Image: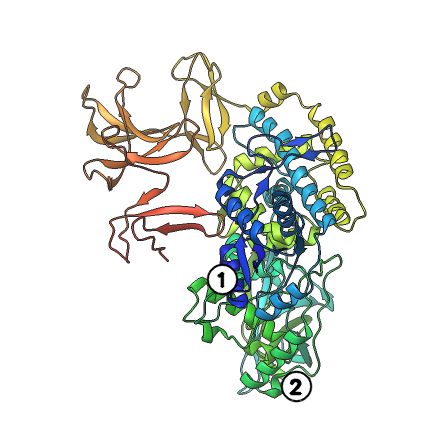
Amino acid sequence: MAKNLIIVESPAKAHTISKFLKNQYTVKASMGHIRDLPAHDLGVDVNKDFQPTYVIDKKKSKVIKELKEAAEKADAIYLASDHDREGEAIAWHLSKVLDKESKGKELYRIVFNEITSKAIATAISKPGSIDIAKVDAQQARRVLDRVVGYSISPLLWKVIAKDLSAGRVQSVALRIICEREAEISAFEPKEFWKIEADFWREELPKFKASLEKMNGKKITVANSEEAESIATGLKNQEAVLESITRKTRNVEPPPPFITSTLQQEASKILSFQAQRTMSIAQQLYEGIDTGGDSSGLITYMRTDSTRISDEAIAACKELISQRFGADMLHSGTRVYKSKQGAQDAHEAIRPTDPGKTPESLQAHLSKEQLKLYTLIWQRFVATQMKSAKILATSATISVGDAGFGATGNQISEEGFLKCYPHVNIPLGEKISKDYGKNDTLMHSSLRQSQHFTSPPSRYTEASLIKELEAKGIGRPSTYASIISTIRNRKYVNMEKKAFVPTPLGKDVNGFLTDKFDSLFNVKFTADMEAKLDEVEYGKVIWHNLVEKYYTDMQALINKVDVKKEKQAMIQDTGIVCDLCKIGKMVIKRSRSGEFLSCDQYPKCKNSKSFTRDADGNIKILVPTILDEKCPECGNPLVERTGKYGAFIACSTYPKCKYSRPKTLGIPCPECKSGEVVSRRSKKGSPFYACSRYPDCKWISNFKPVPQICPNCGNSYVEEKYNKDKGHYLQCPKCKHILD
């Protein structure tokens, strides 16, 4: 009898499920989507209900062949992609591609929240069918993003620079970052002064208190003169403890992770980029060999529900009793309410088996996998533990006409903090329990310190994700790709782990918000997310939604005067061109950044790199003179930066046109005679090659770094980047990834 076929997205997932089912089923992986819109065409018929034209990924031809062969032999086919919009779309596309092979056979859709033997068996026993409404919601999002990209991105190319992109959600995220930066720039700090003193009685420990009131009214000390006057007036005044209150309050453990909170906490605590977090979580979900057992270690990581199954809660409580003691259990069952509008298809992110402690898995997980699993495990276990107890103390002290205040928190019972210590509890001052009302206190001399109000903080990954979630922009599953896109497009830089918009990002945002404000604003985008949800619920026809958006967008596009907008982007500097002596140097922009160009271009092709000083004034970068002579004319050589990267040239250019690429100081890995040089393709993409080209044709897309591989001793490693790992170093010889 032929085996039934189960199709999942990834080989790791297929491998794990195969172990559960042994030889009863054939389990294959689709390797993600097998069909999509074409890479270089719109692929959407705007005149026929925005009907998408899907094409098969050429790279998937071998995979599809294997799937068709397996489907041909099978009695029944189970589509087991993830239980979300993307997963539903993958299942639908598979059903279309395997239409011929599935004729006359049962075609089922099965879903599960965790990859365990029990969950898989339950899913197979209760198969369903493809949710077309969910597929339509995914198609609507995909088509919307495609028509936006293909309609507005070309405007950016014409007005600002080539190869830029606009996105329905990414552009709103950029707008939020730029608006915060504008707030910071416009912020005017205000001076204020703090007046503090140490207070104590007899042998009791001192505590610090700050001036809060004068003559019973709240006070803000505006300047040094006022601070000095107050301090002088209170110099020899008696201090009395007017009141002291002590209250015990409970601190509840935070809810189990959802996608957004996992990304936020992993960013703050582990310094993981959102993409990296999701990649590692995917590995933990799909299953890791832990010595004969390769079941998934966590539940599905794309969810916005805080729901926990009764079975998981029971297992959690049993573990707490065994590990921490029965007295550490919460008296009842703690249930967390999901936010309004949350999708409840999946549970919260939790360990599939709490009994698999981080210590027991240490030998089987990578450092990053262990860190993330530990965070998820701790957070989940903490949900059913006792609350922490905080003794909150507040004291008011009178010194003459002045009122000073002090607050402090002390942890009286750790409770869940024993398991999840990452909850921020400001402790403040330690005020001894032996202090009492009406105590006469001694005090130190009053300390005066100048301060200024602070501007709002720049967004970090964690705070940006929190803001996007709060405003209803995008979905938890899209946050990582949104952040990755605006970084890769060089719309933002990271400074001290915070987003700073680049000049390019500001220009892109300025153009989009000026010309397409109604489309790229927070409220409109949030409303669109809500409408996409309604498509999934079967309340809205998806192509009607797309048509309305497209019509409004085209009306705005038709109003854009490209020539006028392009001219407006060019900034005159007033600097006379030193080459033609006629033109003026103007600021232009490319994806690589700002540069100076003669306004007589193409008649004069003079261009220069520049920076700005603290006041924003232009400072032309002068080529670095090298201690080396030109081999053709004998004049000094200089280092310059051009279209294709750094290079060495004669200082008398254009009189002498000698030039060569700048080397990286690394011998060519292939011929050993030449050196590695940095180059750029005609399209501006960087690559690395041998200086002896064309005699040596060694080439690499990854930047070599002169660092010895600690694993195999290779003389260099390569700088790499992907959306999951971020930037990292890897040995090209043994593939070892450096910490």
Regarding mark 1 in the picture, which secondary structure is present there? Answer: helix
Q: Is residue 337 left or right of residue 665?
A: right
The residue drawn where x is 50% and y is 25% is: 588
* Residue marked by disc 2: 436
Residue nearer the viewer, 689 or 577: 689
Residue 194 at what x, y percent from top left?
59, 63
Q: Which mark is residue 26?
A: none
Dot 2 crowding, Cα within 10 Å, few <14, some 14–19, many 20+: some
State which mark lies toward you, 1 or 2.
1
Asked if residue 24 can be seen in this view, the reply is: yes
Could you tell me which secondary element the residue under label 2 belongs to? Answer: loop
How far from the left and from the top, in percent, is residue 174? 60, 42
Where's residue 719, x and y in %? 37, 46
Work out whether residue 509 or residue 240 is closer to the camera in this orientation and state it: 509
Quadrant of res 157: top right
Which residue is situated farthest in the right direction here? 539
Q: Which residue is mark 1?
A: 270
Q: Earlier in the sequence, mark 1 or mark 2?
A: 1
Name the residue rendered at 23%, 40% in the picture. 670
